[in-house]
Amino acid sequence: MTAPAIEDLLRELTPQVLGALVRRHGQFEGCEDAVQEAVLAAARQWPAQGLPDNPRGWLVTVASRRLHDQMRSEHARRQREAATAAEVVPPDGPATDDTLVLLFLCCHPTLTPGSQTALTLRAVGGLTTAEIARAFLVPEATMAARISRAKQHITAAGRSFSLPDGAERADRLRVVLHVLYLIFNEGYTASSGRELHRPDLAGEAIRLARMVHAQLPGDGEVTGLLALMLLTHARRPARTTAAGDLVPLPEQDRAQWDQALIGEGTDLVTAALAGPALGPYQLQAAIAATHASAATAAETNWPQVHALYLILERIAPNPMVTLNRAVALAEMQGPRAGLALLSGLDGDGRMAGHHRLLAVRAHLLEKAGDTAGACEHYRRAARATASLAEQRYLESRARALADAADPPA
């Protein structure tokens, strides 16, 4: 097996092994350290010595011994190091995939959303602390402290390693899906930094969503979230120029969209909408599928997009939903109708100074012929975002309008 294939296998097995150890020993932080040591040992030994007959059992055994070694003296630990890989003890009982339980644990309600996201990427996604720190543009020491505190909170909570039941399970699943949604959004449109995309984060969110969907295939919202990710990610090749500049949806070359992802996502939307109830991820996926089905921007079914946003606004009120509905409304009834809807967001503290509100207002003012107002709002939006790619785009729109209004002599 090639080194990349072994790396993929280790990424898949790591959360399963960590889940098995936490279920057996109950020490999240110690178990996580032991599993990482086992994975490093496998990465060194397997390419040279070949895969063991039971890779998961090998990792469970090595990690268990590492954990036990942590509880003994340094001398005893060294004595066991050499024998670790040679004598593999099968894990207790049949192999069980504890990934979903581990994901629920990482999204424990006592943790902040930021800690839930970081711990999920570390324990379930297999990213290193340094990789997570780079993704969120914070020092590695800061991220390490955040992850360590999250583990300590989970230990202090004293929860058993098992899936919650009934209403608690439904509530925790919503948190899990929200964390995966946040990870994907940060990967698809980075909140700060030079690059618009962070494909590693978006790809990891999709991988984890596939994992959850494989274990809960009948859940409409799980299916909807995976569909939304695939349909949105399909546009990534067309979202930037060769120089990394942002290309807005109406101007994208749709021939560059990934048709395989669109086909898979569309099939998942159909399955997600077949259930008795509709949730926000299903509706967002349906909106994404509507955009994906249009061969050109002009062929977009805006009445359908608006109707879906209207339903979404009713079942999951959110100023961002209203913002997006204003764009759809403007496409149907003209920019003034969209601007009138946006005016209702001015008093919402969550949107005060938000670059998305400023940018959409600038876009609609431009379409309405208010060049001066559009320029002002494009510039304000550029100052309000930490994403350099978005800044460049917004500033370029302001310059283009200013140049058109006052051409050089």
Image (cartoon, rainbow, N blue to C red):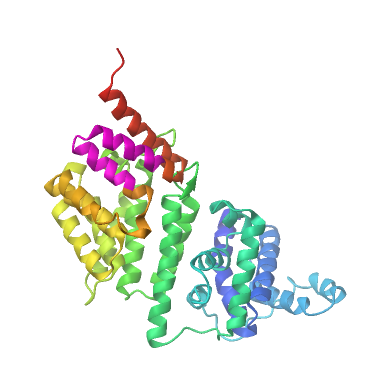
- Residue 66 at what x, y percent from top left? 73, 74
Q: Report the residue that reaches farthest toward the left.
A: 333
Magenta stretch holds residue 370 = yes
Q: Which residue is outermost to the front?
A: 347
Q: Which residues are magenta?
A: 358-382
> What secondary structure predominates along the stretch shown in magenta?
helix
How many numbered marks appear?
0
Looking at the image, which is closer to me, 273 or 170?
170
In the image, residue 137 sits, relative to residue 77, either above or below, namely: above
x, y percent for residue 343 = 24, 52
Pick whichever, 32 or 48, lies toward us. 32
The residue located at (32%, 71%) in the rendering is: 221
Q: Residue 235: x and y, percent? A: 34, 47
Of residues 355 and 182, the one drawn nearer to the viewer in this rendering: 355
Image x and y of residue 136, in percent: 54, 54
- Decide: is 277 above or below 325: below
Q: Residue at x 44, y 37 (%)?
A: 244
Asked if one can make out residue 344 in the rendered structure from this viewpoint, the answer is yes
- Is residue 89 found left or right of 394 in the rendered image? right
The image quarter containing residue 123 is bottom right
Report whether 359 appears left or right of 52: left
Residue 258, can we see it? no
Q: Quadrant of the N terminus?
A: bottom right
In this view, the residue farthest toward the top is 409
Q: Is residue 213 magenta?
A: no
Q: Residue at x 64, y 71 (%)?
A: 32
Q: Considering depth in this image, is 68 or 351 the residue closer to the camera?
A: 351
Residue depicted at x 15% and y 49%: 337
402 vs 200, left or right, is left
Quarter of the image where the C terminus is located: top left
